[in-house]
Amino acid sequence: MTASQGEQLPIRTSEEVVVVRQAVRKWAVAAGFSIIDQTKVVTAASELARNTVVHAGGGTVLIEQITSGERRGLRLTFEDSGPGIPDIELALKDGYTTGNGLGLGLSGSKRLMNEFVITSTVGHGTKVVATKWK
Amino acid sequence: MERIPILKMGDCLLVTVQVDMHDQMALTLQDDLTTRISQTKAKAVLIDISALEIVDSFIGRMLGNIAGMARILDAQTVLVGMRPAVAITLVELGMSLPGVRTALNVERGMDLIRMSPANRSRHDRESR
Amino acid sequence: MPKPASSKLSEVLLRYESDILATWMQLQLSAVKHRGDLIKNSDLREQSARFLELVREGVQTGDPNVQSGAAWAATREMLESLSRSRAKLGFTPAETASFVYSLKAAIFERLREEMGSNPQALVTEIITASELLDVLGLLTMEMYQKGREGVIARQQQELMELSTPVVMLWDGVLALPLIGTLDSGRTQVVMENLLQRIVETGASIAILDITGVPTVDTLVAQHLLKAVSAARLMGADCIISGIRPQIAQTIVHLGVDLGNVTTKATLAEAFRVALNRTSRRIVDADFQASTTGA
C-alpha cells in the first residue's frame, strides 16, 4: 500500500470540521469515488473530526490518496493529544456516549469505512486510521 | 453570525438549508425554529434539505429534535428532499429518524401537510 | 549467477530454436492435458513460438532476475495475457501451467544431445533451465489466479445488477422482485436502484417482494429494514410482500423484528394496499358498467 499524495489539516473548531468535510469531498472526487462512497467517506470524516474537537479539544487530520495493487482508496488519519479512550471496544458500541450525542460517531463511521483502526493511550491521545477503498 | 432563513407561508414555516452547516449553525436553527413556531403559532414546519450533500449524526439529531419540539408546540414537521446517497449513508450510520415525517420534495411535503388529519379537522372547524 | 553456465543454454536455444519448438509442439499436442477443444493448433503454435523466442532473448541477456528484471518484462507480459485468456477459455490452472513446464522436456532433450559427453556440465545446464522455467511456471499460475479473480468479480457485479430490477407497477408504485440471498453488497445495490427510481418516478410506495429470497434470518431482515428506512427517509413507504409460510415461521422463531413495516403474503395483495393508500382501487369492469349504466 502506498500513499501518493496527501494533505494535513487542523481541527480545532466546528467551523474547521466543515473545512475538513469539504477537503475530504475534494479528495474523494479526485480518487474517482461514486456519489454514495463520497457521501459515506465525508460523513465518516465529519463524525471523526467532531469527535476530535468535542473529546480532545482539537487535533489534526491527514488525508491521503493511497493505492494497493490496482485499487485506489482514501486514508484518513485523525490524531489528537486528548484524554484518550480507556475502553475502545466499549467506545465502538452503538449508543455508547460520553458526550451528549447519540453515540453513533465512532461505531457509525466504522460502518461507513472499509478499514478502521483506533489506537489510544489514556492521558496521551488517540489515533484513528480509517480507509475507504474505491 | 450566519443564520438559516425561515420563511412563513400561511401557518407553515419553510426552511431551506442551502449551506454546509457547522454545528453551532445547526443549533441556532433549532432555537430560531422553536421560537418562531411559538411566536407565529405555526401548525407545520417544512424543512427542505435537497441542497445538503451530507447529513451526519449531529445534523440528524438536530432534525429529530426539531420534529420533537415542534410536536410539543403542536406543529407537525415534514423533512423533504433528502438525496439518495444521504439517505443510504444515514441508514448505514445507524439513524433512520423514526419520529420525522418525510416527503420526496417540497410540493409533496405541502400535500402531506394539507392532507393531514389535524389540518383537515381545523379547516372543517374554520369553515363552519 | 555464473555467466558461462547460461551461455551454453543460450547457445543451444539460439542454434536449435526451431528443433526445440517442433519437439515441444509434439509434446504439447500428445499430452493428456492438451485441450484441443479449447485452443486451435495454429494458435498454440504461435504462442509457443513467441514464448520460446522470448525465453531465448531473456537467457541471452544473462539476467537471472526472472521475477522482476527488465530483461524478462516482455516474457512476463506475454505469460500474463496467455494466462488471462486461458482462464477465460476455461483451462484449469494445471493445464495452463503445463504450457510452460512442458517446454522443459524439449529443452532437456536437446541439451542432452549436445552435452551428453559431459554429464557434470549437463546437470548444471539442466538445473539452470529448470529453475528458470519453474519461476515462469509459478508466475503463470499466479497470473491465472488473478485472471480468474477478475472473472469472478465481474460476474458477481453483473449478477448483482441483473438480479435487482426495479419495476413500475402503477403511477407512483414501484416493485422490487428480490431473487436470491440478500447480503450487504446486494443490499447496497438494491438500495441504490430503489432510491434512484424513487427520485426518477416520484413514487411514494415501493413493494419489496421476497418470494425469491430463500431464507430470512436476522441479518437478511436487517438488510431489508435498511432499504425500507432509506426509502422512508426519501418520503416513500415500503410494503414487504411474498412472505411464504416457512419464512413467517422463521421470522417468528428467530424473533426477527420487522418493525412496523406492512407485510403481505402476495405481491397482488401488496399492490391492492398500495393502490388503496394512493386513493385508488381496482373495480370489476362489469360491476362498474352496471352501476354507471343504472
Image (cartoon, rainbow, N blue to C red):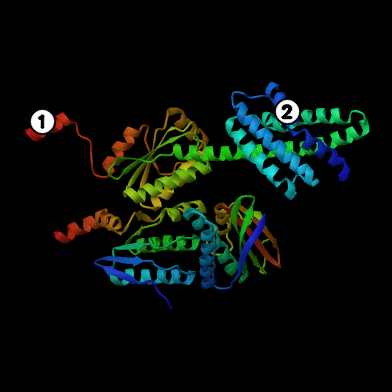
User: Label 1: few (<14), some or many (≥20) within 10 Å?
Assistant: few
From the viewer's side, name the closer residue of C184 and A125: C184
**Label 1 amino acid?**
Ser
Question: Which-is-in-front pick, marks 1 and 2?
Answer: 2
Q: Earlier in the sequence, mark 1 or mark 2?
A: 2
Q: Which residue is mark 1?
A: C290
Left or right: residue A53 compared with residue C23:
left
Residue at 43 percent of width and 39 percent of height: C164
Q: Which residue is mark 2?
A: C24
Left or right: residue B56 compared with residue C57:
left
> Is residue C201 among what the camera can see?
yes
Residue at 59 percent of width and 51 percent of height: A114
Q: Which quarter of the figure has residue A131?
A: bottom right
Query: Regarding mark 2 in the picture, which secondary structure is present there?
Result: helix
Marks 1 and 2, how far apart at CA: 87 Å
Residue at 58 percent of width and 31 percent of height: C89
From the viewer's side, name the closer residue of C202 and C131: C131
The chain containing the residue under callout 1 comes to C
The answer to whether the residue labelled 1 contacts the one labelled 2, judged by CB atoms less than 8 Å apart, is no
> Is residue A62 among what the camera can see?
no
Q: Which quarter of the figure has residue C82?
A: top right
User: Label 2: few (<14), some or many (≥20) within 10 Å?
Assistant: many
How far from the left and from the top, in percent, is residue A115? 62, 53
Residue C21 is labelled as none
From the viewer's side, name the closer residue of C277 and B34: C277
**Label 2 amino acid?**
Trp
Query: Regarding mark 1 in the picture, which secondary structure is present there?
Result: helix
The chain containing the residue under callout 2 comes to C
